[in-house]
Structure formats: C-alpha cells, structure tokens
Image (spheres, rainbow, N blue to C red):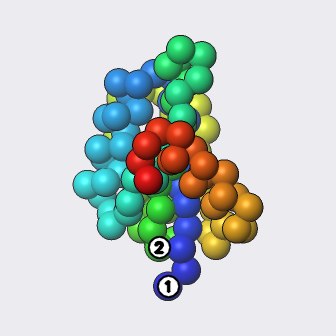
Amino acid sequence: MKKAIGIIELPNCADAVQALDIMLKTAEVRFLTWEKKLGGRLVTIVIQGSVSAVTAAVDAALEQADGNIVASYVIANPHEETMRLVTESAQRQNFI
C-alpha cells in the first residue's frame, strides 16, 4: 500500500479542528502535524494514510467542514524531502 499525505489549509484554528475531526472519522488516516501562521488566522493540517483513505478524508472535509478550506492537496508517495519538512514541523509542535 502506498502512503500519501493530505494537506488542507483553513482560515482559523476552530475550523481546522473541526475539519481534522471529520477527516479522522471518515477514513483510516493519521494526524501528522499542523502549522499556524498569521496568529492562527491560517492553519495547515497534514494527515497520512493510504492514497484512497487520504483522498476520502480530504474530500469529506471539503464537503462537510463549516469553515472555508483555502487549499487542499493529496500527495501520493511523497518525496523523502517533503516528508522531512513534515517531520520537522511535527518535531517543532512536539508531536514526535
């Protein structure tokens, strides 16, 4: 099974938490990290799982989340340097 990451960006923390909850309940994905920019006015969430699970989770957030999702991406089989950036973010947030 190939791994994928899903990335969504929302305008605030409350909307981000709600979207993350939807994604985790929708498919077998794992929360990796989040980044807050502009004082929490822009929040990026990163999840990981199989390509189909990540796609289903991101699609569910796009359909069901109350907040405006500014951007969303599913990256199948991300490059090791991409994963290094995600890992560094998780370490800064003390998730690892």
Residue 88 is at least partly visible in this image = yes
Quadrant of the image occupied by residue 2: bottom right
Q: Of helix, strand and loop, which one carries label 1?
A: loop
Task: Name the residue furthest bottom.
Answer: 1
| Crowd band around label 2 with a 10 angstrom C-alpha radius: few (<14), some (14–19), many (20+) | some
Q: CA distance from mark 2 to mark 1?
A: 6 Å
Residue 74 placed where, x, y %?
59, 58
Q: Is residue 29 left or right of residue 41?
A: left
Going by the numbered disc 1, the residue's amino acid type is Met
Report how many numbered discs are placed on residues in the image: 2
Q: Residue at x 57, y 54 (%)?
A: 87
Identified at 73% across, 61% down, the residue is: 81
Residue under the point 38% across and 60% down: 30
* Residue 59 vertical position relative to residue 81 in the rendered view, above or below: above
Where is mark 1, residue-wise?
1
State the image coordinates of residue 14 (x, y, percent, origin top left). 35, 24
Q: Residue furthest top?
A: 39
Using the image as rendered, state which of residue 53 and residue 37 is in the foreground.
37
In terms of depth relative to the viewer, which is nearer, 40 or 22? 40
What residue does disc 2 label? 50
Secondary structure under the numbered disc 2 in the rendered image:
strand
The local crowd at label 1, few if under 14, some if 14 to 19, many if 20 or more residues have their Cα within 10 Å, is few
| Quadrant in the rendering for residue 63 | top left
Q: Amino acid at mark 2?
A: Ser
Q: State if disc 1 and disc 2 touch (CB < 8 Å).
A: yes
* Residue 58 seen by the camera: no
Q: Residue at x 63, y 61 (%)?
A: 83
